[in-house]
Amino acid sequence: MRWVVRIFLGLLALAGLAAAAGGGWLFYVFQSTLPQTRGEVRAEGLSGEARIVRDAYGVAHIFAETEEDVFFALGYAHAQDRFFQMDLIRRFVQGRLSELMGERTLRADARSRIRGYHLVAEAALDNLGPEMRAAAEAYARGVNARLARGAPAPEYAFLMARAEPWSALDSMAVTVYMSDTLTAGEGDSIDRARLNGLLDADLIDEFLPGYPDFAPTTLKAGDIETLRRRATRRNRTAPAPASDPAGGEEPDAGSNAWVVSGDRTVTGAPLLANDPHLPLTAPGIWYFVRLNLPDGPVIGATIPGSAVVTLGRNAVSAWGFTNTGFNVTDLVGRAPGSFDTVERRELIGVRGGPTITVIARDAADGPVLDGQWFDTSAFPGQEVVLVSAALDRSNAVAEASYRIMTSRSWEAFVEAGRGWTAPMQNMHYAHADGTIGYTAPGLMPLRGEDGRWTGHIPFEELPRVRDPRGGMIASGNNRVAPDAFPHPLPGGYEAYRALRIEERLNAVERHDLDSFAELIMDVTSAHAQRILPALRQSEPETETGMRGLALMQAWDGTLAADRPEGLIFSAWLRALAPAIYADELGEAFPRFNYSRRVFIDHVLNGDLGHWCDDVSTETVETCAVTAGRALDAAMRDLARAHGADISRWRWGDVRHAVFAHPAFTGTPLDRIFTVRVPVGGDGSTVNVAHFSFRSGNFDVSHAASMRAIYDLSDLNNSRFMHAPGQSGHPMSRHYRDLAPMWGAGRWIEIRDDWGPASPPPGARTLLLLPAE
């Protein structure tokens, strides 16, 4: 027994030593990769002194004598805080994730190579002007100066890998990444192809409705008269009004932006608000900076890996973007052998496995999608060609972004968009001289009767307005222009956020920062308000369903986190979707199971009530019956999950914004890297918070990636927020510190009225010096 006890104690001691060693290794991995934010560093490639002053929220204020050294320091700061994120983005575009992650990312790599994203990045580098090229190269030198000091992020230790050097080409890959993320049209092509075998043409048009008459357009009829005159002069005869064909369902991705003139503000100067909606990740897609360039400050949101401020303001103007939703991508089915192709041989390295050879084929107008790597089942017996503005080799988006952030007038801002290809953005603008405006640069295809692309809308005839008559311009990914616009603008548009934004803007005579901040956090759903009268006529059959209906009778459509109504309404909509159209779609229903708000609106409020009938039964069900049964099902499931006392239910208790790590979600490291914040709202509210109808929960994966309000009476009063934090290092105090503030609707300022000699309280300064 003594020997047994001794052996047991020995093993216990060894286990303790192993645990201590493991804990020590973990401590070293995390501690050694934390960004150095104080002291001095000598860096190769720097021409003079540069300072990175991080304020109390980790925002990097960068000071240097030359523009190139400013961009060098930006690259250094990005590499300190976000290099692993930058690395994943470039590898995704270049089709090189599998070199780091192994076979699990092979499909993503093959798809990127076949699409030719890496070739677009190479073209974008060739398209840079001298100033932006110098900025990109200086930025890359700054990134590599940080990499020369050791591992930049703890993820490399867990993956047992090393960080590779950065180049200006890698920064172009970041630009192409955003084109891939935001370019629209591919999903609509697939949906229509799949539905062709399930529904007749009339039902497809009902299921994929066009833009509703009740929803606003961003530009009004009076705003487009100049564009019509330009098109008339070019064509010599005035074109007929161009109605959009029935488009795809409203997108879950999107953003908000609105700007009002000084006639509608307390200060007499314009106000501009912007909150782009993107997938939530940890770290987030944005990194706030202040670049003190020789010509003046530029402040706002950068994308790590890129040398430009994408969204923000300079000394005299501010700008914000939303996605247009224009269909600038088509999937085209063609008979095999009916067109010529050129082959590319792509070699994909796979960590822990053999190199994979992928044969890519390019038609004259785009790559052919290989069924081994893409789901082409919607096009049986055909080869599928991807035709997309995002693949156009004239891509000068990085160059245009540089010109936008350094523009000093409306005319320069508009001209800066020349060369922008994709993604097409609603660009809102405000200047300290009182000018407000809107422009949407990019390659908007013109299509012939057979659907083939015949060209693009000329740059001068793209949607644009300066100082509109109504004194405001608002976008919530709604339709951009009315039927009188001289060119077709097919796309997928969201109807309800813009409806609510315009309603709130018109309800206040003169706006200020606080009224804009209240609107950007608004969680009242115009969609709920429109369909509630019909839902209140529903006929639930259970006591729980009747109790839910009674509570909803007085509800105003506000999905507050601390109330039960948002939970009941959302569960009701989720149950209503299969009740309305699962019988028509059969086994294909899961592919089409998402919000479909305009369609549901038309079913409940319009002349599409026949969708409420279950075609698999002999009885003809009315919408009141179908909605009642859906409410019964929703309330039954909610009571099982949250108890019978409805008064204790809270929307925010079951609904969190989930900032997920791209590599470690679903692994034991998930708890370290993932950030969760309770929120209200839904996909139709101004403070957007999308959940998946298919997921079985209400977690939010898509929401406001950042928020900004710009005050043109004093740009230092402007407000900013993003989440979860500035740093990508989970042990940094700035990894998740902004997330609770983001959830609560709080703000920070990024001012330009102090210098490195007098930083604000809590700031930390890193001095970069040229190498000896």
Image (cartoon, rainbow, N blue to C red):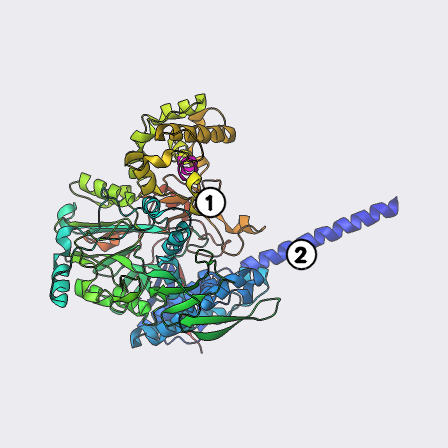
- Which quadrant of the view contains residue 124? bottom left
Residue at far top of view: 543
Task: Give how far apart the Cα atoms at labels 2 and 1 are.
Answer: 48 Å
Residue 580 on the magenta segment? yes
Q: Quadrant of the C terminus?
A: bottom left
Residue segment shown in magenta: 573-581
Check disc 2 and report the residue beneath it: 21
Secondary structure beneath label 2? helix
Towards the viewer: 567 or 29: 567
Which dot marks residue 561? Answer: none
Q: Main secondary structure of the magenta part?
A: helix
**Numbered badge on residue 590:** 1
Using a 10 Å C-alpha cutoff, classify the residue at mark 1 as few (fewer than 14 neighbours), some (14 to 19) or many (20 or more).
few
Where residue 190 appears, as percent x and y from the top left, is 40, 55
- Residue 378: give x, y in percent of width and height: 44, 55
State yes or no: residue 67 in magenta: no
Count of marks placed on residues: 2
- Residue for point 36% across, 65% down: 387
Q: Secondary structure at mark 1?
A: helix
Asked if residue 49 shows in the view, the reply is: no
* Mark 2 or mark 1: whose residue is earlier in sequence: 2
In the figure, is residue 537 to the left or right of 766?
left
Residue farthest along the front direction in this orientation: 618
Which residue occupies the foreground of this view, 376 or 760?
Answer: 376
Which three-letter amino acid code belongs to the residue tagged 2? Ala
